[in-house]
Amino acid sequence: MAACIGTIDVNPGPADFTSTEHQHPRHGSSISQRPDSKHVMFPGALKSAFSNTMRFEQPSTYPALPTYRIVDQHGVVVDPSFSPDLSDDEVVKLYRDMLAVSIMDLIMFDAQRQGRLSFYMVSAGEEAVSVATASALAKEDVIFCQYREQGVFKQRGFTLNDFMNQLFANRKDPGKGRNMPVHYGSRELNIHTISSPLATQLPQASGAAYALKIQRMQDPSVPPRVVAVYFGEGAASEGDFHAALNIAATRSCPVIFICRNNGYAISTPTLEQYRGDGIASRGLGYGIETIRVDGNDFWAVREATKKARELALQDGGKPVLIEAMTYRVSHHSTSDDSFAYRARVEVEDWKRRDNPIARLRKWMEARGCWDENKEKEARDSIRRDILKAFSEAEKEKKPPLRTMFEDVYEQLTPDLKKQMSELKSQLERYPDEYDLADFEGGRDSLVK
Amino acid sequence: MRGLRTAVRLAATARPSAVRPSARAPLFHKAAAVPSVQKRTYADASGVKEYTVREALNEALAEELEANPKVFIMGEEVAQYNGAYKVTKGLLDRFGDKRVIDTPITESGFCGLAVGAALSGLHPVCEFMTFNFAMQAIDQIVNSAAKTLYMSGGIQPCNITFRGPNGFAAGVAAQHSQDYSAWYGSVPGLKVVSPWSAEDAKGLLKAAIRDPNPVVVLENELMYGQSFPMSEAAQKDDFVIPFGKAKIERAGKDLTMVTLSRCVGQTLVAAEALKKKYGVECEVINLRSIKPLDVEAIVKSVKKTHRLMAVESGFPAFGVGAEILALTMEYAFDYLDAPAQRVTGADVPTPYAQKLEEMSFPTEGLIEQYAAKLLRL
């Protein structure tokens, strides 16, 4: 059996987590009410004060939650307490990750338009959210992405070849060519394979976090780990979002929920997506520590994630919510033309006014570790590397035919073996009708 | 067999009146629980003991929790309340609240959590109060649990067991009375089993928990309280039943009756009646496993009897019965001496009214009647 991502090694000996360790006792079963109490000790609201004024709470009377930022759009530090915890070289590396993602996006979007791959999704405008959050996590932490987080993969060590092999579904694609483009996954990097249905990754992340918590309970010598899960503000309308936050809170799971609020769910603007104060206000409703950050501010996102990781590991584990405010400069995907539902000028304005890459670049230039020449050199060399990986991957053979039948179950079932054998007979009988040159091993990969 | 059948009343044995919601009823959201009847008899000389299906399931869960620390159970009311149908009775006290976990009422949430835990290497058993409520979470079961191994290129196995009562119960109306055998049976990546007897229940559930793939165990509420003899071998903690192998519950030469879950018992009663009245010998095959399906056993039997009838309680269209007939046509057409038949649930949302409900599902009398017709008796 293949090992899982973030696999739990459990001692085969006596099961330690069978011992009833009441870290978080169940509430509600034995609450007593003192006479003449000022507070109603209803089981469902333990600290609610009596009031003799009937008043419905108005969401509009509450100020919107603030948006934390460290660096403004001119690259100027506005949080006086801030001092960077990375060396200049480390910052440059992360900046190059953001650049690489944005250049790769442009090239692959065009490649899709040329018909060289079926589909692509770019993350323009949101590079800081993925790269900066990932930079604040540990290598051992487990990650669930939605689909617009190529920056997370890049930061954690996914190579340009890895991206291209998946996009071209060739024999080196660890997903064996079975998934749509951009549905990356990596066991080595502890990132679960991206799954298309929206928001399903959220309760799964709570479950993975629960598994990590159990692992720590059984073996306190393993380093503490968290799960980070990404989603958009549109996905937060799915029932799974609510289920995931509620169950992570009630089961005290060490999971960081990272919302990329980019203003659009395909064509639906946030104004039509929800009426409340963004996604952050919902975290409070579930009893989850929450912060809203400027998603275009690399440093704010990084610092918030660092702190969130610390919080998530406190008190035996608990969930944290980060809402990163940004703007989806790109179309939703290659299947979308966003100028059908938003003005081109709105996008141009955003691009000009604020961009996470430009903002970090201004900060770096002010610091003296970056300049025009370095920028040009970086862009040229990244572009060259991408095109090299691109053409290598495109020329690579397709996965063996055999992989069509594998991994439906852990072992090939008799039915699947029979189908494989039938396919082989068919190919042997009509060798001239099928061109198998592109597939590794041709028909020899099939077993009769 | 399509449409609403003529009036055939359920035999007394088929409908334990205790399951009608009364004590805790009316519960609007969830069907009422059955009071636990846990009595286990002494072993007879051969070591055979009587077990209810509930006890068999409970023993299977306890043994697997004991054997493997990666196994845990979660679901609504599984811990403190001992399970809506008492299948998890005593497990919280024995294994603690980290392994027997009560969840909020959010099927997509706890099912998603269980899938995530399975993708991270634990072996969760996800209990649905009934499979009717699992529809809230069916995306997690079908799109995530069943497909992730394949879609991840084989790097993410999902060792998870989904279990709970399936099919119609009694007096719980259309939204609580559906049979999901055909639904889950159609999904590549899932394995699906449906026990009838106590031995089936224990052996299949244990095999499901040990199997590295996602397995759906479709139990039946009306069977929980029924007792069956349990062999000495089946009482041991290493007892498992292999998937994809049907069991011939009754041998015969005149008609092959392929059935599953609660209908096995009804079909056996019908087969006995057919023997008494007409002297015919029907072969009753208990499928046990829906996916993979034991086509070989069916074909082998049809080659002997030359007649086939499928008996199941799902809706007729695109159902388990339809699949069995189609497979028989594909693999054993030349051996059939008469058109194969199916007896199924009626193609209607299950009525609440008791008499109408009775008319909506196969009964012993009806099975007998249609078998007699098929055999031209």
Image (tube, coloured by chain):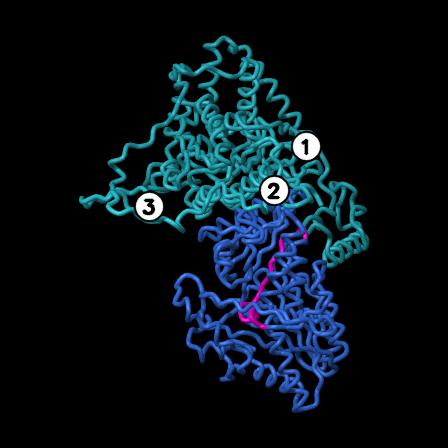
Chain colours: A cyan, B blue
Mark yes or no: residue B260 visible: no
Image coordinates of residue A227 in percent, x first then y, are 54, 36
* Chain of the residue where label 2 is placed in the rendered structure: B
Q: Which residue is mark 3?
A: A45
Task: Determine if the magenta segment contains residue B225.
Answer: yes
Q: Residue furthest front?
A: A35
Alpha carbon distance from label 2 to label 1: 30 Å
Secondary structure category for the residue under label 1: helix
Image coordinates of residue B190 in percent, x first then y, are 63, 55
Q: Of residues B296 and B76, which is closer to you in this image?
A: B76
Label of residue A393 in the image: 1
Q: Amino acid at mark 1?
A: Ala
Q: Is residue A132 above or below residue B227?
A: above
Secondary structure category for the residue under label 2: loop
Which residues are the magenta region?
Answer: B211-226
Does the residue at mark 2 contact the one at mark 1 (Cβ under 8 Å)? no
